[in-house]
Image (cartoon, grey):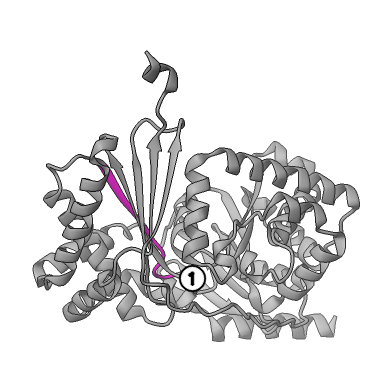
Amino acid sequence: MFRKIIAICSLTIFFDSSADKYRGASLQKLENGATVVFVGSTKSDSVLVMLCVSSGSTDEIEKRGVASLLSSIFLKKLKESVNADSHQYGSESSSYTGYDQSVYYLYGKAGNLEEFIKNLGVTFSDFAFSIDDLNDSKKIIEQQIVEDQQNDKNVVRNEARKSLYWHSNYGVRISGNLDDLKLISEKNVCDFKKRNYTKDRVTIIIVGNVDKKSALKSVLKYFGNDKTTSEINRLKEPPHHCSTVRITKNSTQVNVPIIEMYWKIPNYRNQKDNALAAEIFVNYLDEALQKNLSKRAIASMSFCYSFWNYDYGDFCMTITAKNSDSIEDVITAVLSEIKYIASEKITEEQAKKAAKKLSDSTKMFHFDIDVLDFVDWVSKKVGSCYDFDFLKSYYDFVGKFDINKVSEQAKTIFKNDPCVISIIKPAVDSKKNAN
């Protein structure tokens, strides 16, 4: 009993002295190396518990697809651990594996909080599986790979990533390939888990109207006090070749041409000012291109970029052209316009407008943040959930920018031609052509 009282007192002191707050969220760095994030919500009586591990396919050394296979087995064991009664009350479980992170979550009634923490903690700490578990998960991954290979858009995008990240696992499909999948053994999965699923790579996110001290006590109980660490040894990105790789595919799966252009961007992980400046420019670029190219043979355009969350970085522009005859004209026009916009110094007014657009998108980050909004936010903005410095400061950071840096980053990203241009064209219908 005396030892328990000491433990509870220590827990209380630790909680009060080390809490790091962000708008409705507070962060705790535990002595065992893990991080706990609490996000308060009074909008429902539900609770979300997420286990985020900073480990993904980039940590694979030999066989490809081990991280994805481990995630599938982990989720299977996690679902088996959840009390059947919980499912009757709308309990949900899911997982996601990416290049740098693996995320598992349980969602349900607030009364299930301790059970959810226990399920995640026990599965994480006492991970064990059978050959049947392995084979069942292999079948799931195999189906994902087959479906991925049957989608022409995915095939072309996978080829583009191979060219962008030719030297590392960032260029390899996260789920691996069928040949590697067949050869992955139980030992391969266990070794990967032991090497990468360590406490210092863990972030536990708890969303809901919960008692923080009680929840933290459960985390320490089921995840243990022992400290486990590992070193993240991901390859640094070398400069990409200057010439543009061109990938073209005729496809029966599209009705109009789809053009994608990829630029490599700097690693902004520890360069917040530069990352913000780049993001402001991209938001300005979006509007400027839409306006300047409105009369061209373009049906739509969109951007996808990763400035904040990863050790790698790329900017992808997707353009839907109106017809195949206009493809080359569209490419020339878009590239010329981007270089022109990037070379011109963006005005203070234009930058403020773009920054306001970013700021408006963060209005959901308030003290009563909704559970589902937070899940969407985490998946889009935080990724692996271990860069909490970004999470804390982003909302306020958007309003503070250096106009000169915005122009500087625009030129940095777009001074060269795209690294990859991929084109998916509608395949010629041979029967129609013959008639």
Q: Is residue 317 highlighted in magenta? A: no
Task: For the C terminus, give its image quadrant.
Answer: top left
Q: Nearer the viewer, residue 388 or 418?
A: 418
Residue 422 rendering spot, x and y as whole percentages: 39, 51
Could you say where residue 58 lies in the image, as x and y percent from the top left? 61, 69
- Region of the chain picked out in magenta, as a range: 300-308
Kindly identify the residue that appears in the image at 42 percent across and 23 percent down.
429
Of 285 and 308, which appears nearest the observer? 285
Say whether residue 306 is magenta: yes
In this rendering, does residue 339 appear at all?
Answer: yes
Instruction: Using the rendered view, name the quadrant where residue 200 is placed.
Output: bottom right
Asked whether residue 34 appears in the rendered view, the answer is no
Residue extending farthest top: 435
Q: Which residue in the structure is indicated by mark 1? A: 310
Name the residue nearer the viewer: 420 or 349: 420
Amino acid type at image mark 1: Tyr
